[in-house]
Amino acid sequence: MTVIEEMGAKAKAASRMLSVAGEKKNVALKAIAKALKDHSEKIIEANKIDLENGKNNQLSASLLDRLMLDNARIEGIADGVLEVAALPDPIGTVISGSQRPNGLRISKVRVPIGVIGIIFEARPNVTADAAVLCLKSGNAVILRGGKEAIHSNQCITRIMQDAIESTGLDRNSVQLIEDTTRQSSVELMGLTEYLDVLIPRGGKGLIRAVVENAKVPVIETGAGNCHVYVDESADIEMAANIIYNAKTSRPSVCNAIETILVHENIAKKALPVIKARLDEKNVQLRGCEKTREILGDSVVPADESDWETEYGDYILAVKVVGSIDEATAHIARYSTGHSECIVTNNYNNANQFKAVVDSAAVYVNASTRFTDGGMFGLGAEIGISTQKLHARGPMGLNELTSMKFIIEGEGQIR
Amino acid sequence: MTVIEEMGAKAKAASRMLSVAGEKKNVALKAIAKALKDHSEKIIEANKIDLENGKNNQLSASLLDRLMLDNARIEGIADGVLEVAALPDPIGTVISGSQRPNGLRISKVRVPIGVIGIIFEARPNVTADAAVLCLKSGNAVILRGGKEAIHSNQCITRIMQDAIESTGLDRNSVQLIEDTTRQSSVELMGLTEYLDVLIPRGGKGLIRAVVENAKVPVIETGAGNCHVYVDESADIEMAANIIYNAKTSRPSVCNAIETILVHENIAKKALPVIKARLDEKNVQLRGCEKTREILGDSVVPADESDWETEYGDYILAVKVVGSIDEATAHIARYSTGHSECIVTNNYNNANQFKAVVDSAAVYVNASTRFTDGGMFGLGAEIGISTQKLHARGPMGLNELTSMKFIIEGEGQIR
């Protein structure tokens, strides 16, 4: 057995205990929250080594900021753990049930998935966030974080393991792969005997690599090439407001927009208003020819690659379209299926957009920035699925569960 | 573009039309049922070529029987299509919904998955069965059947395509890959741009190959190493009856049992009764040492491989266990997670078994042969999932759907 296979076997054993742990899971979560606060100095010390290494390896300022942990951030992580503890336990929920003509009682009951793998990059807060969501939903978790955060991750994981063990649960409920070479990810992706699902959290490259190479089931997350379509009948102020919010409130996240599509009958009036709002944040516009006719040469000419790109930055592609059909066809072609919005006051067009657009979240007259587990009322979120199987959109605790059928009888045979 | 990529692109286009086709889908299904009956002679003719080739290639009698189509079987297929047409349409169902404090109305709505691939072996009835379930749930389907049934599959597919087209839907809603070389399966497994899910239907080898090689999401189906545990407190007649039914009513199917576990305190009384029932069908027993002490040398000594094997035949492994914990540990180790049963009259043991056993269907006092979409009241079934993501156990129309969030507002921003 390799090290990672051994971790898989230990996780499987821990998951059996967790699947029937009930309220003990919350006791463990509260112990984790307390331990993280109690040992914050230790975490900060470990984090300093990662920051030092990061500086020596010329990590960008924004990466270093993501990596950094201080007392306030650790407090935030611990409070997040307590919030998860306070959520209702999804396990044991009866999803549906019936009595069959032969007297059998069949019920469909929510159960944990089993063992979940999480591959993530440089954010050490994910170590605790992901682990506690898995724990709360009765799953064992194997974490594989990036090398940039390895000392922080090790420290946080040990604190969590000790806390879990102190409450009588199996410390292997949460494990961290300490080998951060490519080899360890590849092995995790092939751990079919032990791993029930693998969730990559991070940039496009990481997610693509996991989807291409994993033999275990994967839930694809995160890629967001999101659109706002400004319909002919849109309230222009509302459109400008939504676009401004969806582009500039946090450009790096996946629910920020990258392209707007504007109906030609409203473009002349709407585009200057939209541009004026976006100028406040110096958003660079990349437009089609018609956009540039209206807004002038300050708009960079857009090419094919602009429709495909998730900028994650203060850049917005702009296209004037002749109809709602052209808008939805553009979205069908270029969207990653995350979040799209129509701004309209036309009842039929709103309904057409809702029916035809095939994305996880389809909005009428609201910012795409709401695509988020907390905002949707799920309580917490482990990621946003952009695939169609198992989970789509923000994934909360329910999305970390499976189900089984329980059938009770008195000796029925077929 | 390769032939299969072109099929993928056509399927994607067809799926867009299907996703909003509503009642037109049922019109198409009824047209398919009628066309299959009207053209049964043509189908039988094509089937004769497959049967002829099968005989020349020394296919076994049971494979030839699965391959064979006559008027009665075609009638049966057509009736099955009408039954699917009569089921409620899952698309558009509002699964849940809420109004958020900021006034946003969020609803989670059932939508089609998109494009489904089905890889299957020698049964030409799957061509129609699978296609109509996909169609009913608003999905386009790409079928890849075995070479043994290629002429039958081609004929049935063309009849379905003509029928679909005659009702105004896209004939590419159903497509068959006519190249039956290994290369075409491999290409289908890698069609990430167009295929939303791939469902293999067939033997262990096929399913393993798909799980190992597919880059698209897969739903694993079918492997069934199922168990009955006879608890200390079991009604012996009931246990013998359930075991007889679960083993002998159809040994080749995945919900038949392969191993029984018998509590040592009841083994001496129960095993002879169970054996007497199984002797009626000449079931070969392969037992542990204790079993052989009780039942004698007519029982073949079981070894490790017997606990792992899905016989699919009139063979049953028998193990005497010291406790319910030993029984559930055995199941945890060897089961494929399909269906397991406890026969008991002990309330706590029934509950322990239901909680601890991690299989798609967990029975108390009923035959595992009930694990079936029809028997569970799902109306129809495309397979039985033995994985934990997306769908588990019998998969009906709901399991062929995804969902999306619809969010409606009045200009809300975050």
Image (cartoon, coloured by chain):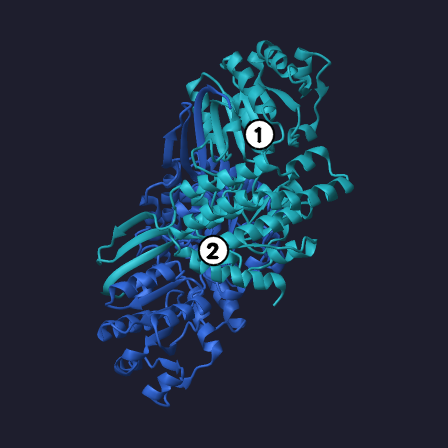
Chain colours: A blue, B cyan
**Disc assigned to residue B166:** 2
Disc 1, SS: strand
**Foreground pick, B84 / B105:** B84
**Where residue B120 sits in the image (x, y, percent)?**
61, 45
Q: Could you confirm whether marks 2 and 1 are on the same chain?
A: yes
Amino acid found under the numbered disc labelled 2: Ser
Left-right relation of A287 to B72 = left
Q: Chain of mark 2?
A: B
Label 2 neighbour load within 10 Å: few <14, some 14-19, many 20+: some
Q: Residue at x 50, y 35 (%)?
A: B360
**Where residue B126 sits in the image (x, y, percent)?**
57, 43
Residue A194: quadrant of the picture = top right
Q: Which residue is mark 1?
A: B226
| Mark before the other along the chain sequence, 2 or 1 | 2
Which part of the image, by quadrant, shows the N terminus of chain B?
bottom right
Label 1 neighbour load within 10 Å: few <14, some 14-19, many 20+: many
**Where residue B226 sits in the image (x, y, percent)?**
57, 29
**Where residue B364 sits in the image (x, y, percent)?**
46, 23
Q: Please determine whether, in this image, residue B350 is positioned above or below residue B155.
A: above
Foreground label between 2 and 1: 2
Q: Residue at x 67, y 12 (%)?
A: B295
Q: Please determine whether, in this image, residue A225 is positioned above or below residue B132.
A: below
Can residue A141 be seen by looking at this rendering?
Answer: no
Q: Please determine whether, in this image, residue A255 is positioned above or below residue A191.
A: below
**Disc assigned to residue B59:** none
Amino acid found under the numbered disc labelled 1: Cys
Residue B355: quadrant of the picture = top left
Q: Residue at x 53, y 67 (%)?
A: A53
**Foreground pick, A345 / B293:** A345
Q: Chain of mark 1?
A: B
